[in-house]
Structure formats: structure tokens, C-alpha cells
Image: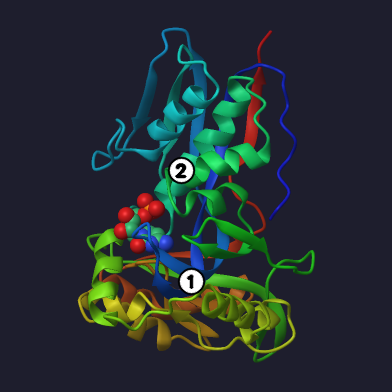
């Protein structure tokens, strides 16, 4: 896991936390667990597309979330509020309060873990703001209680994620981060991300539909799960990210569930495949956001330019992103006098 900075005990009057989006470079549904969740084998990658949380303390014990997006809940239906409540309950300090201003940049309901990342950022920021000094392992445990993607979004970077998604294993990479071997040699792995702003996919629906379609075709034994995890650790995708070979086709088992149901996913995948030299094209998470990978940001930007007219005609929003080596991160603090 990416090493997070040790907790700084100094009280602060205000802080800002960045909450990066993620994409799935691999999402394999292995089996159904006794707790009703699916056993997964994934490779997740943080992006430099991030939400921002500005947090200030309050003396009245209220947790107040403000956000300019009317479709987002600002009560206990938002992971930011749930994270704050869980953290102060865990610390035995129910009197703690905060005002949190959430600036959304990550598309909502898109399979990019925006909500999970906001929850992770709230855990990290409030732990510092309230001077609780919970260590990284304790924060990761709380993160897993909030949602399957929250632990990854807390620590971020490039990681293998097993179990429900909360069992993290860092991928050993060069200091330059994940690599991509393009037609003109190696470069940094860069992403052209697209989303139809009016489309959204419910994650529980996607997993439920996966279950209907798979029927009994799930692995059952831990030894079978472990064999799949080993193939992923030793397989071509990680070797490619380490710069040793070209990217293989990407696998997302939820793509075959969502694609037949969502016209915009089919159209978007076709569009991305028509770009010049995409190294791979896939859906992220349970969708409907889609991405193409390139060797270098310039190529991702050139592809966006090449596709711009078709993207606009198809109603897609587009972002060119670099990979990020970290998850939720405190970016600014104002010290208490
Ligand atoms: O953990 P999280 O709240 O993000 O999960 C949302 C839903 O996605 C779950 O309620 C479940 O239906 C489905 N899910 C699953 N297996 C996973 C992760 C999520 O079935 N490993």
C-alpha cells in the first residue's frame, strides 16, 4: 500500500483534502461470498482527477455538508457524513463537529469511486482536524466499514484489491509510476476518460445482474480464488505496468453485464476504439464511465482532439488524466493560533 504520512497532532483551524478518482484496470468477479458480496480480483489506479473537501471545525457538534450539486445527498446518505459520524463514534468523541464544503469534479454514479473517495478524504481530514491521531491501519479499518472501494481510495496509487475490494496489495512500480509501451516506445500511462452525463449505473444492480447471468458459474473454494489472485499478480497486466511488455486487453466482468443494457456504453466504447492508437479500452467499475489508455498524456490529448466532434455529437464529457501515485491527501492547512 502507498505509505501515508504519519498523523500530525498539531490542531488546525481549516484544511483542504483532495479525493482522487480511480479506474479499474482489471475487475474479475471470482465468486459469491457468505456475506452476499462478491469476491473480487481487481487492479485499481488513482487518477489526477479529484474532488476537493474544505473542512473547518464547529463547536455545536453538528456535521454540516455543503455541496453545489443538488442531486447529491448532504445527510447520512452521503459517505462524507457517514465517515464523520463513524470516526467520532470510534474515537468516543460524539461532541466533535465540522463544516465540510465539497467541490465535486469527479462525475457522479460513474464507476470512478467519487463518493468513496470523498468518504476516505473525510476520514483523513477529520482525523487531523480533530487531532484524533488514529493510525493508518485504524483508518483503513473504518474505511472498509464505509464501503468496498473506500480503503483503496484512502491509500490509492496502483494496487491489487481482493476480497470485497478492501484487501490491498501495492503493485511494485518504478518511481515514474505505471508505464505504457506505445508504438513509439514507452511512456507514462495516460487516460482519456469519457462519460455520458445523463447515464448512470447502480452498483448493486450491476452485481445483481451479474449474479443472474452467471448462475452457478462462480468459483467456490479459497484455493481457486488464490489461484486467480496469483495469475493476476504474475500476469501480463502487471508486467505491462512495470514497463516489461505491451498492455494486454483489459478485463472487466461487469462490462459484459452493463454493455447490453446501456446504449451509451456501447457507443462510447466504439468511439474510444476508433481513436488513434489506444493501447486498451474498457469500462471502469460498474460503469458507465469508459476509458482508453495511451503512452503519454500528449497522445491522450491528441485522441480527445481527434474524437472531439464525435464526443460532442454523442453527448459525452471527456477528461485527459495522468495516473496518481496516491489516494486521499491533505493539501493545505491553516494552523490554529
Ligand atoms: O461496498 P459498497 O457499498 O460500495 O457496495 C455497493 C453494492 O455493490 C453492494 O451492496 C453489493 O450489492 C455490490 N457489491 C458486491 N460485491 C462487492 C462490492 C460491491 O456485490 N465486492
Q: Which mark is residue 192?
A: 1
Between disc 1 and disc 2, the foreground one is 2
The C terminus - image quarter = top right
Q: Give coordinates of residue 281: x percent, y percent.
A: 46, 81
Instruction: Label 1: state its secondary structure.
Output: strand
Tell me if residue 85 comes above or below residue 303 in the rendering. Answer: above
Q: Give coordinates of residue 70: x percent, y percent.
A: 24, 38
Q: Give the residue at mark 2.
A: 145
The residue at 49%/23% (across/down) is 88
Q: Residue furthest right?
A: 175
The residue at 55%/22% (across/down) is 91
The N terminus - image quarter = bottom right
Instruction: Label 2: state its secondary structure.
Output: helix
Crowding at dot 2, Cα within 10 Å, few <14 / some 14-19 / many 20+, comes out as few
Evaluate whether residue 87 shows in this view.
Answer: yes
Question: Does 65 sit left or right of 3 as displayed?
Answer: left
Image quarter for residue 311?
Answer: bottom left
Tell me if residue 51 comes above or below residue 258 in the rendering. Answer: above
Evaluate whether residue 200 shows in this view.
Answer: no
Amino acid at each position: 500500500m502507498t505509505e501515508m504520512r504519519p498523523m500530525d497532532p498539531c490542531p488546525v483551524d481549516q484544511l483542504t483534502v483532495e479525493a482522487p478518482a480511480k479506474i479499474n484496470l482489471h475487475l474479475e468477479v471470482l465468486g459469491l461470498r457468505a456475506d452476499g458480496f462478491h469476491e473480487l480480483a481487481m487492479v485499481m489506479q488513482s487518477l489526477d482527477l479529484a474532488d476537493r473537501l474544505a473542512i473547518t471545525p464547529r463547536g455545536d457538534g453538528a456535521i454540516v455538508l455543503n455541496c453545489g450539486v443538488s442531486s447529491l445527498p448532504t445527510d447520512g446518505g452521503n459517505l462524507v457524513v457517514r465517515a464523520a459520524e463513524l470516526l467520532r463514534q470510534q474515537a468516543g468523541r460524539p461532541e466533535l463537529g465540522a463544516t465540510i464544503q465539497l467541490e465535486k469534479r469527479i462525475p457522479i454514479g460513474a464507476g470512478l469511486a467519487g463518493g468513496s473517495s470523498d468518504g476516505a478524504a473525510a476520514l483523513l481530514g477529520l482525523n487531523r482536524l480533530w487531532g484524533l491521531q488514529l493510525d493508518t491501519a485504524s483508518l483503513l479499518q473504518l474505511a472498509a466499514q464505509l464501503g468496498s472501494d473506500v480503503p483503496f481510495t484512502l491509500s490509492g496509487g496502483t494496487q491489487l484489491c481482493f476480497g470485497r475490494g478492501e484487501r490491498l496489495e501495492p503493485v511494485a512500480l518504478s518511481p515514474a509510476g505505471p508505464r505504457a509501451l506505445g508504438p513509439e516506445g514507452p511512456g507514462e500511462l495516460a487516460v482519456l476518460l469519457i462519460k455520458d452525463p445523463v447515464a448512470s449505473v447502480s452498483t448493486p444492480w450491476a452485481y445483481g445482474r451479474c449474479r443472474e447471468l452467471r448462475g452457478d458459474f462462480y468459483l467456490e473454494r479459497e484455493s481457486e480464488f488464490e489461484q486467480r489472485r496469483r495469475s493476476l499478480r504474475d500476469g501480463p497486466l502487471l508486467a505491462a505496468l512495470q514497463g516489461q511488455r505491451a498492455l494486454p486487453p483489459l478485463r472487466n466482468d461487469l462490462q459484459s453485464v452493463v454493455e447490453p443494457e446501456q446504449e451509451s456504453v456501447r457507443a462510447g466504447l466504439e468511439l474510444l476504439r476508433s481513436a488513434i492508437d489506444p493501447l486498451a479500452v474498457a469500462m471502469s467499475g460498474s460503469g458507465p464511465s469508459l476509458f482508453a489508455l495511451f503512452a503519454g498524456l500528449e497522445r491522450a490529448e491528441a485522441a480527445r482532439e481527434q474524437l472531439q466532434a464525435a464526443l460532442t455529437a454523442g453527448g459525452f464529457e471527456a477528461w485527459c488524466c495522468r495516473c496518481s501515485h496516491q489516494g486521499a491527501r491533505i493539501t493545505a492547512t491553516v494552523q490554529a493560533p
